[in-house]
Image (cartoon, rainbow, N blue to C red):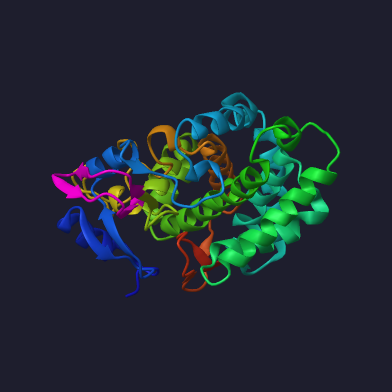
Amino acid sequence: MSFFADPTPYFDKWREQGPALIETPDGQRSWMISRYDDVVQALSHPGLSSAVIPGGMLNHTDPPEHTRLRKPIAKAFSTRRMEALRPRIERIANDLLDAWETEDEVDVITTFAHPLPITVICELLGVPERDRDEVRTLTAELLAPETMAEAFGRFALYAQRLVDTKEPGDDAITELRDEPNLVQTLVLLITAGHETTVQLIGNGLLALLRDPAMKRKLIDDPILIPDAVEELLRYDGPFATGLTRVAISDVEIGGVTIPRSSQVTVSLGAANRDPSRFPDPDVLQLGRDPHVVFGHGIHYCVGARLARIEGEIAFGTLLRRFPELALAAEPEWRETFIRGLASFRVRPKP
């Protein structure tokens, strides 16, 4: 079975090896870091640089530039501001699910998992509604290896045009207008600001449909849904292969010395299935220790709170309105570095 259909055997092999130079599923030669403790160490190690791609994008910078760029973005994505979005996110979720009421079968990705977070992030940033189809297309092409480079250039041109022409308003683009590297920041926020949540909803709902007891538990006791969101993120999060770093000095991780100038891959997916941290890791179980889906250290995802809120509302609304929701066909997995479903058809009602 391919890595994209089921990465678990790969995770097991990588952890058994420990830090080692391997060929990754996308054909790269890289040092793979996969055990939970090693991943946490790697994500905060000063000898592993995030600046693997030039251009000044937040997730590819190191201090002090990273510190300077992150501060205003973190303010724009403050917990208070994200919590204030709950009523609007609930309305969007219910509006999308209204269309399910008269359908015998729907695709979760195209009708709910994708439009919910893309609508939220575009409204938060101030992307005009007329541009959202273009943004969806650019995002999809940016995440596909064969179109990534060309799509980034077009996405950057779109973001620059948006910054140049947008009227000031009550939105994050207006708030960040005078910040450096705004174009690169917008590409990152639009893409990462919804893609993680698309996969949380898709991957997570599939896991629930394959675990009827857990699904029933959440229907009977919705107060457990925030805890379930954490477990669904751990169980099948979007960053299976992981994050890329480059060693700027010889670095020792897990008792192994990684030579200077080496490419390093930090597998969040493998760490989140590490049995030394999570007993019975291939089973859904509430109340576990914290996962590393959103990273660790200074690069911890700035949009993590928004993704959690969207996940809580998405699962809560889905299970309340369609408690008999069932899988209609075997889902299809995308072959991209973001783990997620290309097609996921369900029957809303019996």
**Could you tell me residue 155's position as x and y percent?**
68, 57
Q: In this rendered view, identify the residue nearer to me: 13 or 163.
A: 163
Residue drawn 54% across the image and 47% down it: 315
**Could you tell me residue 70's position as x and y percent?**
55, 32
Please tell me whether residue 88 is drawn above or below residue 103 in the rendered image.
above
Q: Which residues are magenta?
A: 246-268
**Could you tell me residue 243's position as x and y percent?**
40, 51
Task: Quarter of the image for the C terminus: give it.
Answer: bottom right
**Could you tell me residue 152's position as x and y percent?**
62, 59
Residue furthest left in the image: 255
Residue furthest top in the image: 80
Q: In this rendered view, identify the residue nearer to me: 236 or 254.
A: 254
Q: Quadrant of residue 136?
A: bottom right
In the image, taking residue 35 as reference, residue 266 lies left or right, namely right
Any part of residue 225 in sight = yes
Please tell me whether residue 332 is drawn above or below residue 87 in the rendered image.
below
Looking at the image, how many numbered discs can be counted on the residues?
A: 0
Residue drawn 58% across the image and 54% down it: 322
Q: In this rendered view, identify the residue nearer to me: 105 or 87.
A: 87
Any part of residue 98 in sight = no
Please tell me whether residue 299 is drawn above or below residue 25 in the rendered image.
above
Task: Quarter of the image for the N terminus: give it.
Answer: bottom left
In the image, taking residue 64 as reference, residue 19 lies left or right, namely left
Q: Quadrant of residue 138?
A: bottom right
Is residue 152 highlighted in magenta? no
